[in-house]
Image: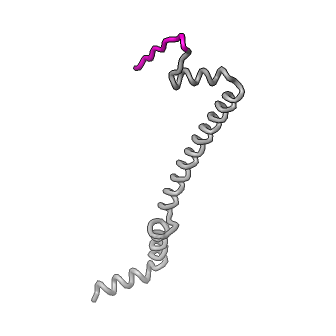
């Protein structure tokens, strides 16, 4: 019984500190919008923004290549020769692999 009185007097004496600690634990760990989840969301947002930037660069590069192909017939021939190994009738092709 003596322990219970000591415990109760400790709680009454430090009720505001205990309440603040419990509130802090709820905010940091248990809440739906907790600090830990927010950090995870921020990390995910930054990864997605990097991915968006990568795709934007890829899109701009592809658009540039497409515009070049539409305006330059020699570019079409170059791509056909390099990528699809096409050749003229009087040429020989040698393919080197690393």
Position of residue 58 relative to residue 86, above or below, is below
Q: Quadrant of residue 64?
A: top right
31 on left or right of 5 = right
Single out the residue that lies furthest toward the top: 90
The color scheme shown is one colour
In this rendering, the answer to whether 48 lies above or below 30 is above
Residue at far bottom of view:
1
Question: On screen, 67 above or below 18?
Answer: above
Please give the range of residues in magenta: 89-98
Where does the image place residue 52, in percent across and percent down from the top left?
59, 46
Residue drawn at point x = 49 percent, y = 77 percent? 16
Q: How far across and how far down the image is residue 76, in percent?
A: 63, 24
Q: How many marks?
A: 0
Quadrant where the N terminus is found in the figure: bottom left
**x and y percentages locating residue 63 in the rendered image:** 66, 35
| Image position of 2 with respect to 60: above or below | below
């Amino acid at each position: 019984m003596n322990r219970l009185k000591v415990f109760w007097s400790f709680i009454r004496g430090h009720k505001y500190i205990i309440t603040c600690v419990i509130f802090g634990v709820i905010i940091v760990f248990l809440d739906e919008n907790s600090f830990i989840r927010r950090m995870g969301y921020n990390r995910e947002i930054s990864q997605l923004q990097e991915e968006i930037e990568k795709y934007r660069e890829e899109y701009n590069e592809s658009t540039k290549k497409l515009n070049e192909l539409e305006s330059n017939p020699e570019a079409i021939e170059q791509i056909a020769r390099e990528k699809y190994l096409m050749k003229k009738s009087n040429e020989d092709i040698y393919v080197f692999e690393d």
